[in-house]
Amino acid sequence: MSQGAARPGEIASAATAAGAAAAGRPGIGAFVRRKRAAWERLAALTARLGSGGLGLEEVEELDRLYRRAVGDLAWARTAFPGSDLEGYLSQVTARSYAVLYRRRSRPGRLRAFVREEIPAAFARHRRAFAFSGAVLLGGIAAGALAVALDPGAAATLVPRPVRNAVASGRMWTDSLLEIAPGLSGSFIARNNVAAIGLVFALGLTGGLGTAWLLFANGLLLGAVAAYCVQRGMGRPLLGFVAAHGPAELLCLILAGQAGFLLAAALVDPGEDSRGEALARAGREAARLIAAAVPLLLVVGLVEGAISPGALFPLWAKAVLGASLAGAALLYLFWPAARAPARA
């Protein structure tokens, strides 16, 4: 048999040979009929990947079919040793392994990851992104309404240091100016990365922990905003959050999106085992987190050096904040507009 790409006719030949031997080897014909379509698909995807013609989702399908075919080969070696079927599966899995795990140049791989894989992963899971954003915005609305309708709710929802600072007519964030901008920015960035990491990881609670953290963060933000507006501190608050707030919220929503991917794989793994589904969802989620972390590092620097105080006018901070979030959304959505959505 040729060492090139497997052809569908080879599967038919294997099935014919298996059928001829079925009398002496009970079960081989039924085994071939049940698995044949998957092997044909594996052979076709292997041939296309060898020539560089697969999208990311098809590569992942190829990886999944390859792992199943390896299991089929192990079974064939046990149940039908020496058969044409065993030889065929050995060749097909060897070809698939060669194209899946061949060495690639790191610069090209990194470039493809940033330019193609991250936006494509985002596109496949736009509904999870929308759900994550809805939970966060729902928390913001709930916190703002609670304080607006019942000012006494601020005693529960707004932290005491914030209430004390607002009562004295100053922003509680002014202390950031007392620290060297580089140090405060790195401290904020570390805290932000830890926060989104927790939102993501709690997807393993079936999404309940992720949803609660998103809602709780929104609840706090909404309550603080309403409290500041009620006491005439709305403009100073806007002056603080305008430069970094939009991008920071976007990162939180991306982390929620990644967490909900883990939750979906855990709750409904489909035809795969739960471990396989979680591994696949983890790879997708890692791409989303890879988009959020660099943006959070920039956000930390902006929040520590630009957001506090009145050194920069409000309009400049607003332009910076809109530009950061807008550029990130353009990067994610522009390729996403051409890709199909998936839950």
Image: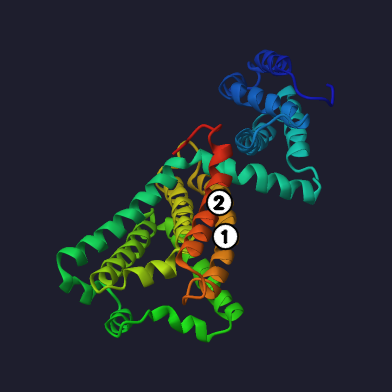
| Picture layout, residue 192 above or below residue 59 | below
Amino acid on which the number 1 mark rests in the picture: Leu
Note whether residue 209 is visible: yes
| Picture layout, residue 55 above or below residue 283 | above
Residue plotted at (54% across, 65% down) = 299
The residue carrying mark 2 is 328
Note whether residue 82 is visible: no
Number of the label disc, if any, that sits on residue 59: none
Crowding around mark 1 (Cα neighbors within 10 Å: few <14, some 14 to 19, many 20+) is: some
Residue situated in front as seen by the camera: 273 or 222: 222
Amino acid on which the number 2 mark rests in the picture: Ala
The residue carrying mark 1 is 295
Residue situated in front as seen by the camera: 9 or 183: 183
The reply to whether dot 2 and dot 1 touch (C-beta < 8 Å) is yes
The percent coordinates of residue 121 (x first, y second) are: 56, 43
Secondary structure beneath label 1: helix
The percent coordinates of residue 60 (x first, y second) are: 62, 38
Q: How is the image coloured?
A: rainbow
Q: CA distance from mark 2 to mark 1?
A: 8 Å
| Picture layout, residue 111 above or below residue 39 | below
